[in-house]
Structure formats: C-alpha cells, structure tokens
Amino acid sequence: MKGEQQRSKFVLCIRNGGSDDLEVRKVYQVFPDPSAAHDGYVRIIDESGEDYLYPSEYFVPVRLPAAVSKALLISA
C-alpha cells in the first residue's frame, strides 16, 4: 500500500478505528507526506476539516477517471 498511496491522489476509507472524524466508504484526497508514508500513514483532511495522519490500513487506493479526480481535488 505504501507505494500505491504515494501515486494515488485518492483513497477509500474501509475502516475508521473508532474515529468519528473518518467516514467508512468515503473517498478522501491524499496529501503528499513522504515521511508519514514511510511510517505507514496517510495525510488526509478528515471530517473535522483539518489534515491528520491515519494508519494506511484504514484505506485502499482508488483510481478515478480524470474528470472525477479534477472535480474532487481540494484547492490549497
């Protein structure tokens, strides 16, 4: 998953570990964080509206059509 996460801009949450700030079956945008990826984490903006690190095993990478990716991208 580590290599996939670095290439994937989006992941699907498959479990939340009891966190109310993650929604299972929701697609999240991944923000580049090589150090976090190396340690097995992904950086996303969760339901609190802040970016946090979560264990990579909570997510699976998803490939979306270009038009969908463009529509979902969060502008910084």
Image (tube, rainbow, N blue to C red):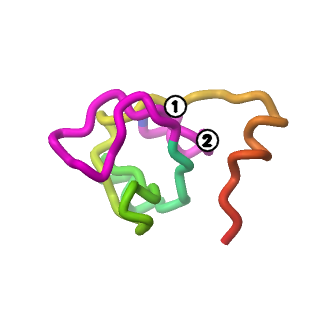
Residue at 69 percent across and 46 percent down: it is: 72
For residue 56, which quarter of the picture? Answer: top left
Could you tell me residue 40's position as x and y percent?
31, 46
- In the depicted view, which residue is nearer to us: 75 or 33? 75
Indicate yes or no whether the magenta region holds residue 17: yes
Q: Which of marks 1 and 2 is in front?
A: 1
Residue at 78 percent across and 28 percent down: it is: 65
Residue at 58 percent across and 40 percent down: it is: 10
- In the depicted view, which residue is nearer to us: 52 or 42? 52
- In the depicted view, which residue is nearer to us: 47 or 45? 47
The disc label shown at residue 61, or none: 1
The quarter of the image holding the C terminus is bottom right
Spatial CA span between label 1 and label 2: 9 Å
Q: Vertically, is 34 above or below 4?
A: below
Q: How crowded is mark 2: few (under 14 residues within 10 Å), some or many (20 or more)?
A: few
Q: Residues within 10 Å of mark 1 (few under 14, many from 20)?
A: many
- In the depicted view, which residue is nearer to us: 14 or 38? 14
- Determine whether the residue tagged by mark 1 lies in a helix, strand or loop: strand
Could you tell me residue 19's position as x and y percent?
21, 48
Image position of 38 (left or right of 18): right
- Determine whether the residue tagged by mark 2 lies in a helix, strand or loop: helix
Q: Vertically, is 58 above or below 34?
A: above
Residue at 70 percent across and 29 percent down: it is: 64
Contact check, label 1 and label 2, Cβ < 8 Å: yes
- For badge 2, the amino acid type reads Arg
Q: Residue at label 2?
A: 7
Please state the extent of the stretch shown in magenta in the rendering.
Answer: 2-27
Q: Vertically, is 52 above or below 72?
A: below
Question: Counting residues from the N terminus, which is met first, the one under dot 1 or under dot 2?
Answer: 2
The disc label shown at residue 41, or none: none
Could you tell me residue 2's position as x and y percent?
43, 39
